[in-house]
Image (spheres, helix red, strand yellow):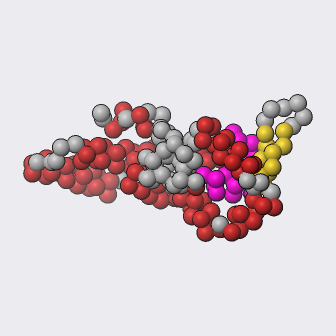
Amino acid sequence: MHALHHPRFLHGHPRGDHGDGIGGGRGARGGGRIFGHGGLRFVLLQLIAKKPSHGYELIKLIEERLGGRYSPSPGIVYPTLTLLEELGHVSVDTAEGGSRKRYTITAAGREFLAANRETTDEMMARMDGGVDGAGPRAGRPPQVVRAIENLKLAMRLRLAREPLTEQQAHEFAAVLDRAAQQLERI
C-alpha cells in the first residue's frame, strides 16, 4: 500500500485508538504512542486545571496543540474523563436542562498533578513538541509535519517487506540523498 493511501494519513489523523494513550500505538518515536499508556489522563487533568472545560473542548484543544495531526476520539476521551471523576480528580457540572458536562479539577486532582508533576510535564511537552519536535509550537506547518510522517511511514513499510537487494539499497539511499539535497535548496 502506498504511504499516502495508508489509513493513518487519509484524513491527516492516525487511526486505531486503543487505551487512553494517544495514537493507538502508532504515534510517536519508533511507532509508539505520543503519551503512552495512561498518559492522556495527565494531559486532560492539566488542561482542566487551566480551564474548566467540556469534553469536546478538550478534544479540540489537544487537536490544536498537535497541529491538527491528531484528534483523540470521544471513545477514548470520555471514558478517561469518567475515570478522573471516579478517582475524585474532577467534578462534573451540567448546565440547567443541558446534557453537556463541564469538568472542573478538584483539590484531590490538584494534589495528584502536584505529586505527578514530572510525568505531567513530560506528557504536555510531548504534546507541545509533537512527534520528533515537529509540533505547531516548533513552527512547522501541518503539511510539512504530515509529509515527514508520510516519508517515515513509507520507509518503515518498505523496510518491513523483504530485505533490500544491494541495488535496491543503493536506490533507496539515492532517493533520500536527492530529497535532502532538494530540501537544502529551499
Instruction: Say whether residue 31 is magenta.
Output: no
Quarter occupied by residue 108: bottom right
Residue lying at the far right of the rendered structure: 96
Q: Position of residue 163 (x, y in %)?
A: 16, 47
**Residue 184 appears left or right of 101:** left
- At a point 49% along the width and 46% down the height, the residue shown is 23
- At a point 37% along the width and 35% down the height, the residue shown is 6
Inspect this view and state whether residue 13 appears.
Answer: yes
**Residue 142 appears left or right of 3:** right
Q: Position of residue 16 (x, y in %)?
A: 48, 38
Residue lying at the far left of the rendered structure: 166
- Locate the N terminus by quadrant: top left
Q: Position of residue 160 (x, y in %)?
A: 25, 46
Residue lying at the far front of the rendered structure: 86
Nearest to the observer: residue 183 or residue 148 = 148
Residue lying at the far top of the rendered structure: 97
Quarter occupied by residue 157: top left
**Residue 170 appears left or right of 110:** left
Instruction: Say whether residue 49 is magenta.
Output: yes
Q: Position of residue 166 (x, y in %)?
A: 9, 51
Inspect this view and state whether residue 139 appears.
Answer: no
Q: Could you tell me what secondary structure mostly forms the magenta stretch?
A: helix
Nearest to the observer: residue 79 or residue 126 = 79
- At a point 58% along the width and 54% down the height, the residue shown is 38
Give the magenta range: 40-56
